[in-house]
Structures are given as structure tokens and as C-alpha cells.
Amino acid sequence: MTTPLIAIDNLAIEFLDHGEYRRAVDGISFSIDKGETVAVVGESGSGKSVTALSLTRLLPAPPVCRVSGKILFEGTDLASLPDSALRGYRGGKIAYIFQDPSTSLNPVFSVRSQIGEAISLHRPDITNRDAEIVRVLDQVGIREPEKRMFDYPHQLSGGMQQRVMIAMALACRPRLLVADEPTTALDVTIQKQIIDLLRSIKKDLGMSIFMITHNFGIVHGFADRVLVMFRGRIVEQGLTEEVLRNPQHPYTRALIDCIPKLGHKRPRLTTIDHAKL
Amino acid sequence: MTGYILRRLMVAVPIILIISFLVFALMEMAPGDFLDTARAQRDISKETIHRLETEYGLDKPWAVRYGYWIARVAHGNFGYSWTYKVNVETLIAQRVPATVGLALASMALAWLVALPLGVLAAVKKDSLFDRVAGLLAYASISLPEFVLALVAYYFAATSGLFPVGGLTSITSDFEPFHARVLDYLWHLVLPTLVLGLGGVAGALRIMRANFLDTLAADFITTARAKGLPENVIRFKHVLRNAINPFVTSLGFAFSGLLSGALVVENIFNYPGLGQLTFQAFIRQDEQLVLASVVLASVMLIAGNLIADLLLAASDPRIRLEGPGTHGRRSIWVAVGGVLAGAILIAAAMQLPWGETSFWKGLKTYGTWALLLAGAFVVWTAYPVLKRILPSLIRRPVGCTALVVLLLMYAAMLLAPLLAPYSANDKNLSSTYHPPASFVWKDGSLHLQVLRNADRTVARYEPIPGETIPVSFWVPTEPYRLLGFIPIAHKLFGTQAPHKLYLMGSDSTGRDVFSRLLYGSRVSLTLGLIGVSITMVLGFMIGGLSGYIGGTFDDLVMRGVEIIMSIPGLYLLIALRAAMAQHFESDEIFVLIVVILSFIGWTGTARVIRGMTLSLRQRPFVQAAEAMGQSRVRILLKHILPNLASYLLISATLSIPGYILGEATLSFLGLGIAEPSASWGLMLAQAQEMKVLMLGFFWLFVPGLATFLVVMAFNLLGDELRDIIDPKFRLGGRA
């Protein structure tokens, strides 16, 4: 077995709340192989997003937040790396796409400036920055990238903004792309376009993707493996097909049951009854 | 861009017309005219007066004179100053550089000092630096400008490091150019510091809040996730966003500086526009007043325009739209408003505005109106207050502020008991008596008796061994405490003829402590009453405007903008000058309250309108509408409770404005008059050269009291805001 791209060992995250620490993530371990797509599924507050942010220490500094455990990226423990060294990983090796592109892009800088910033930071060898910006914008399916790169975020639609976010992430050729609910803030037709885009990028570039979602519908046919998180723990993990076909944990089953299916007549949408879990 | 600027300037024309009309009408309402002083002099013959009346046009009806004025202005001639006997343009051209220079210097000070400090405070949030900077900012916001100016003046006079007022030295004209520039700057330092300090404090707080807000934004996480170094994130990504609301405040800052300049110019004898206008108002030098007010309004409108252009340059999201079809309609609405206003004012001028009897009547009925307004505010605020009082008491700052205020109000109510003398108990043989010193003798507290050693400089020296006991619960003439408790004692005192001057005595030997207590009746109640009226007016007008919408809304909002376009203090003085000088103190009190509320309601109305607009769309309001409830009922029952917390915060934070407003007016001699007491009036005495040079520091005590009250209200308001909505930062959300 080859060494995984990233291996998380016994990660715990705690937040200070009214003078005492509360655990948001409770000692989880998992790994992602090179070229693999792993999805984390779970409801709001189950610890998915903070897990993703903790990979490159993007969470608030102590004492607000305490993180323990190991994050081995290609053999280096990111958790114990000094800030200056960690910055090389952020964006350069591990890039992020966030949930809401309308708030995740800085409103006062142009698309060109925001992507260019990432390129000059992590790929200083590139001399023709604009050409590279046009290339990545083209790659994420933005038409007329030569013109669009001078736009400001508010001049773009939600789907276009998310494409810019993806372009920004891809610009530095990361090894791992962390996508934190990249489709939640978009409407349904755009969601499909973005997922298709991610799928084709993954095929072209061969990077690993760590995808966070609460939607099993997206997981199917996109992720190789699935982790199910519930109340800060991983309650089930396995190949996507298997988990979907034969869920072991009652929470996973409940989660899968929540997906509305066409043709089924139900008086109400299924919800999860936490008392039974 | 050019088109946009042109459109904005076109809208400004009707606004300036209305302002000039308003000011003209106000001056016309004032009893008497420019020639009053001439008439009072016996050696000026009736014929001369008559000739002058014809020359100045004072024999013609006011509408005709205003028409003439407009016609002249249309030809580019702003008229002739009766006092200075020169063209108004010449006069103003001499004064503009001083005021604009002062305003720009103060603004530069605010930007250069407040911006970096605000950023530093935000970056080092909760550090010692942040706390100290926050406290100092609070302190300088709460300090009345004229008190600060007096202190600076005192400093200049005693230290000799800075010139005592003036624009340049007398010898400056004979110096080479670079020396003249240095001389000018040297004269500019203290006025700039005084005028700019409040701005620095305000800007620092805005900058800090914006910076912290932006620091929490999603795109900052994005920037971090890109691997940017923390300094690039702070000084590029955060700063460029955090500075935008700051740019917006620029326009307001400019108008504030214009008003503030008046006080500073007066104290420092700085030959600026403020001083000129102030004196022109007092002398009713009609054309000079009109021209200055127009110019000040133009500068204010231009300041706002520049701020908007800067904002558009700095924030790509802002598109310069200016008045579109909607705006064009507004112009017509505004022009209609001028006509309607003209008719209204013409009708109103038949009323005996300037007469004392009018204000007497207003006082009688007004008292009831004020009580009603107060009841309304209490009724609105009570549920909110009840909810948050427990958390307020648990916070150390909030609790302290509350206790300080409660103590001050208790002292105000118990003034007759606490004050050893009445407010007007003169003693010309012990003027400027220093604060009492005590000795412990024979097992009781004794007062050291002082002798007036040198009357000309009011030098006192202790008489060795001569002391008199301080007695408590001293019998006195019977009076009723709080109006109903019969009592015949004072809390403390000494046996006549020696007096106990706890905080010294003033220029006529009156006890500063007693006057402070009696004066608090004005200074402390005025804010509460004024704020009640403002809130009621603001809610009624803003709420109706937002709720009804359409042309009514347009008309009201243009009106609000017009009132807001007049530099505040000018409007205050114009209104005050319009009302004759021969008033009783209590009438002046009513007058000041009415005037301050008239200026103050606009800001509240604007915010309330915005909030009502958004509340109107909310399902519960639509449900009430669907059930067929009346508008008034919906406003009172469904919308008002949702605005209550905003109203409470806003009321607490605007009380200081009223207290400072009264103090400034009284200080300028337009407010409460002798022999009554108010803190601003007491401070006016501290302005005298004698007080400054001989160091009668105790006359600054009312300034300290004002500072404490204002600071307590500011802190209380901020604490309330923190409790009600931690996200509710400066400026509100509407």
C-alpha cells in the first residue's frame, strides 16, 4: 500500500464557550490517497467544516479554539509546523473552495488581482501572469476570460463567482482541493454545472479532492469514498457505493432516507429523529 | 462622471434656495432689525434712520426684499455688509481660507492619527493599548469642544509656547515667505488640535469597528487559505474594505467641522467664517448672514459630493447613479416644497413668534406636551429596559455609568437640601474665593477662614488659627423638598458671616457648588426632555414616511435632507436669534429644547424610516394589514415595539448632544442667562482672561461635570447596544 497524500490522526477540535471548552471534533482519524476523492457527509454542526479548516490551521487562534492530533501531509506534520512554513502549504499544496462565493471573494479587488495574488505567491517562476490567469479562467469554463478577469466579484453571477473561486484554487496546482459545501449557496442547475466542472478537473489534473457536503445526492458518482460524521465523530466510512447500498450506522441510514426520491409519494419529507439515535 | 457631478449640483440648487429662504424667514421673525442700535442712539436723527431704512430696503416687505436678494444673486452679486460697509464677497473671500484651512487641517489630523491608531487598536484587540485608546477616545468625545478650547487657550496664555489666537502674527507681513508659512502653521496648531480631537476619537472608533468587522469576513478566510502573509491580509484585504464606511463619514465630518469651527474660532479669535457669521447673526446683518449660510451649505454639499466620489473610487460596488427619474421628480417635489413652505412661513409670520407671550403659552401647553412625550418614551422603552436591566447591572462599565447618572440625578432632585446657599447668593467681598480647606480641631470638622489679601487679583490667604466649625443639618427657612416634603434644614453649612465655598466662588462671590447643583436642573433635564421630543417626532415622521411611502415619503425625506444640509450650529443660532432676547430663564429653557429637538429629529427620522420600510415587508405586518387594522394601530402595535431597542439606544446616545448643545449656546450667550444657573453659563465665566491668567481653576468644575454626564451617557448607550445586539455597531444598520 502506498503512503496516503494526507493522513489525519486522532484530530480533536475544541472551542471556548462561556469559559469552558466544548468539543466540536472528537478524535477522528482518516486519510486521503493521491488522486482520490473523499466526501464527508453530516448535518450542520457535526464538525465537517472545522475539520476542513483545521487542515491548514485556518481556525481562530487559541484560546478561542484548541486543536490536537496529527495532520500528516506527504509525511510532514502540518499541526506542528510554524506559521511561515505553513503558508507555503496553504493555497500552494492545499487549496480551498468555500460555501458562499459571494462573501468569499473580496469585493474591492478584481478577479485578476485576486487570482494573480495566489499565482505570484506560490508560482513565482511564472513570468506572464495574465496569460496564466486567462488559462485557469478558461479551464473553469468562463467565457471571454480576457475581459472577465477585470471584473469585480459583484459583477459576476453566483455560479461565475464560484468558478472564479475554483480557478483561484486551481491556479497554484494544489495536491489537495478542499471543497467546503461548494454548491450549497447556488441554485440547483448551477450546482450540477459546478459538480461536473469539479469532476472534469479532477480527471484532468489528477489531484485529490476532500469534499464536504450534507447532500448524499452529490456524493453518489462523485466521491470514491465517504465518511459520515455525526456529533464530532466519524460513525461510518467506506466506498461510496457500499455505504449508499448498505449503510451500517442508523444515522447514515436516516441520512440516506432524507433524500427525497421522485415518484415516491410521502406525506412529508423524512427528517432525522435525534432521540432515537 | 461629469454628468453625475452636474446632476448632483443641479439638485443642490433648490436645496440651497430653500435654506436661504429658511434663514431669511428666521431673521425676519426676529424682532427688530439691523438699525435697532442706531435707533436707540439719541444723536442719530429720525431722518437719518429713515434714509438708512430706505437705503437698506428695510422699509419694504420681507418677501420683496427676498425677491431682490434672489435677483441680485442671480446676477452674481451677493450684496453688501451693513456692518463692515463692504461687499459680502470681499469679506467672505478674506475669511474662507482660515476656516477651510482649519477644517482641512483637522481632517488631515483625524486621518493621519486616527486611521493608524484605529487599525492598531483592532489588530491588538483587547490589549492594554486598545483599552487605553478606547478610553481616551471616549473621553475626548465626551469633552465639550469649548472646554477643550478654553484649556488650550489657557495653556497658550500661560506657557507662551503657542500664540494666543489670531491667524498670523502682527509682524508676519514683513517676514520672508517661509517665515510667514511657519507663522501661519504655528497659529494653526492649537485650533486644529482642539477641533480635530473629537474627530480623531470618533474616527478611531469607526476605524477599529470596521476593521474588526472586516477581519471576520469570509473573504479573509479565503485570503488566509491562499497562504497570504498576515500583514498583506491586514493592510491590503482588510484595510481596503474597512476604509469604505470611513470615507462615507467624511462628508458628515466636514459639516461637523464647519459648525465646530465657530466655537473654536470665537475662543481663539481666529478670523474665520464661523466667527463672521455668528456676529452677523447677532447684528442681523442680513445679506452677510445669507451669503455665509449659502456658502456653508455649498461647502457641506460639496463635501458630501466629494465623499461620494471618493467612495466610488474606493469601492467598486458603488455605482454613481445620482438622481435618476426618481431624483428628477424629487427636484420638482422640492420646488413645490419651497412654494408650500413660503406660503406656510408667510402665514406663520403673522403669529407673534418673537413675542414673549407666545413662549409663555408654549410653556404652559408645552409642559403637557413634554410630559406626554416623556410618557411615550417611557412606555416604549420600558419593556426593553426591563429585559436588559439585569445584564446591564452585571457589566462593570454599564453599572458604573448607571450609578454615576443616578447619583447626579439624585443630587439634582435634592439640590435645595445639598446646596448650602441659593443659586444667586452674591457676596461681592469674596469674589473668586478658592475652594474651602478644612482642619480637624476640637474633635470636629472646622473650616479654615481665609482673608481677601488683595482684592484686585483676588488673592486669599489663611488667617492663622482662625477657624469656624462646620455644622450639619443646619436650620434654615422652611421649603419643600421635591415639591412636597416640608423641610427646614440644609445638609451642611457654617455660621454667618463666614461662608463655606466647597468648590470656590465665582466673579460675584456666588458658591460654585450650589450653582452647580441648581444648574444641573437645566443641564440634566434638558437632555431627557429634548430626546423625548426628538424620539416622538422622529418616530412619527420617520415611521409614517416609511409606512405610507410615495410622494409623502419623498417630500418628508427631501425636507429632512434640507434641514440636514444646514450646518447644525448655524441653524441653532439662526433659530435662537430669531427669538427675541427678552426672555425669562424658563422660557429660554423651553426655547432651547424646542430648537435642539427641531434640529435633532432628522437623523432619527431617517433611520426610523429605513427600519420601517424593511419592517413593512415582514409577514407579521402584512398579516396585520390583511386583517384590516388601521395604519396608526399597525405603527404603534406592530412596528413600534420592533423599533423600541433602537430608540432606546439612540435616545441614550443622543442625550449628550443636547447637553453639549445647551452648554454651547449658553456659553455663547444665547442660552440660559444670568442670574439663573446652567453649566454652560457657568463656564462662560471661565472664558475671561482674568480667570485664565490668575488660575481660578475651580471655575472649570461645571466642565468636568458636563464631561462626566456626557461620558456616562455615552458609555451607557454603548453598553445597551452591546447587550441588545452585539453586531449593532456605529451608525446603525438601516
Image (cartoon, rainbow, N blue to C red):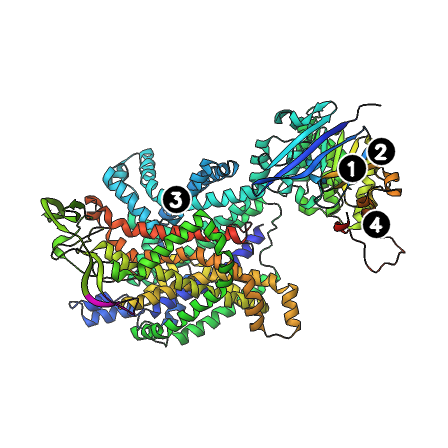
Tell which circle, 2 or 1, labels the residue nearer the N-terminal end: 1
Badge 2 marks a residue whose secondary structure is helix
| Rendered location of residue A217, percent (x, y) | 83, 46
Q: Residues within 10 Å of mark 1 (few under 14, many from 20)?
A: some
Give the amino acid type for the residue marked by disc 3 in the picture.
Leu
Quarter holding residue B154: top left
On residue A257, which mark appears?
4
Q: Nearer the viewer, mark 1 or mark 3?
A: 3
Q: CA distance from mark 2 to mark 3?
A: 62 Å
Residue B710 visible somewhere in the drawing: yes
Identity, as a three-letter code, of the amino acid under mark 1 = Asp
| Magenta segment | B477-487
Please name the residue that numbered disc 2 is placed on. Answer: A203
* Residue situated in front as seen by the camera: B510 or B249: B510
3D distance between C-alphas at marks 1 and 4: 39 Å
Q: CA distance from mark 1 to mark 3?
A: 53 Å
